[in-house]
Image (cartoon, helix red, strand yellow):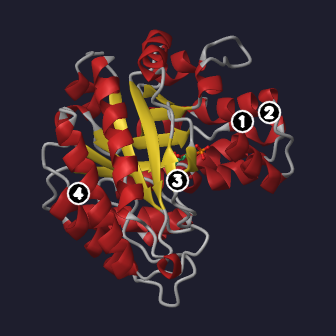
Amino acid sequence: MSERLEDIAEAMVASGQGILAADESTGTIKKRFDQIGVENTEDNRRAYREMLFSADEAMNDYISGVILFDETLRQKAADGTPFVEMIRKAGAVPGIKVDKGAKPLAGFPGETVTEGLDGLRERLAEYHELGARFAKWRGVIDINEEDGLPSSTCIQANAHALARYAALCQEAGIVPIVEPEVLMDGPSASHDIETCYEVTEWTLNTVFAELFQMDVLLEGMILKPNMIVPGKNASFQASAEEVAELTVRCLKATVPAAVPGIAFLSGGQSDVQASEHLHLMNASGNLPWTLTFSYGRALQQSALKAWGGKGDNVPAAQAAFLHRAKMNGLAARGAWSKDLEQA
Ligand code: 5MM
């Protein structure tokens, strides 16, 4: 496979395919395992990820890249095959989450800045050696209208860190996924869809100004944004058509056409909603970039439940994963429909 940043980025958003976000840190995967009563041990984490990566049809046909956590990048399947090798064999690009998490922003109660820049150059060199060809860094922006959040300081600090991370990745021959997430399920989450639009527009404009300052090659990156949705506790929810229309409008106003692809996070949407929204955007046509998925929960939730920590359930879990991967693969081509969900 070509090592050019532009070619790797194109491969990550290949038509009808998208990215599996399987980079839950140890604390986040514990929350997922708690839902199904599975102990959060290294071997259970390994077995769960092996179930996903060995789902041949899903991986071969619908998954173009997999975001891994540090531990997972170094793990092997039960037969000794390194996970990185399995992912490559399925024709997907192995990637790595390199941020060290969202930490309290000093002087700005309730807000966070994502850390992990110190020593990142050296870590990226090692990740490249281990086979990663793209990376991910997530900045978190919370809307809390009562407390006047977000502050411009929070948006600026996160955008700056994202741009410094992206420049370091490209120096290392690694495609950066730039993920500024405006939360739909933060502590308050009562904001309406218009507020989500305004904050996301502000955030993306700030992020692209910082990327320009850091001389980041737009053709060699992928954007991973939230969709424009109301907070989960908002009194008025939006129609799928409204979400799709406002999301495309916001992205057209802020994301340069030189960016090859936009791969959405699901952020707390139901798995079917996440597919429907992506489908409607692609069906609307006339888009300057490829729009696809980089879902965590919306790809994995049904598979996680079907697995339940039992080896006997692997075929059922892989069937559930295949179904979601296929639905999202169709949505990425604007070819999804509700009837196919039943099938
Ligand atoms: C898979 O979850 C990712 C890692 O989260 P932590 O660092 O908190 O463990 C997360 O960044 C994920 O890649 C994105 O939020 C997209 O996942 P969703 O579930 O929102 O689609």
Q: Nearer the viewer, mark 2 or mark 4?
A: 4
Label 3 neighbour load within 10 Å: few <14, some 14-19, many 20+ = many
Question: Real-space Cα distance between discs 2 and 4?
Answer: 41 Å
User: Which residue corresponds to the image point at 49% horizontal and 48% vertical from the top-left?
Assistant: 113
Residue behind mark 2? 44
Q: Residue 18 at what x, y percent from top left?
A: 39, 43
Q: Residue 139 at what x, y percent from top left?
A: 45, 49
Label 3 CB sits under 8 Å from any ligand 1 atom: no
Location of the C terminus by quadrant is bottom right
User: Which residue corresponds to the image point at 20% horizontal and 54% vertical from the top-left?
Assistant: 255
| Mark with earlier residue (2, 4) | 2
Residue 64, quarter of the rendered image: top left
Residue behind mark 4? 205
In the image, taking residue 231 as reference, residue 279 lies left or right, namely left
Label 2 neighbour load within 10 Å: few <14, some 14-19, many 20+ = some
Q: Nearer the viewer, mark 1 or mark 4?
A: 4
Q: Are marks 1 and 2 in contact (CB under 8 Å)?
A: yes
Residue behind mark 3? 112
Kind of residue at disc 4: Asn
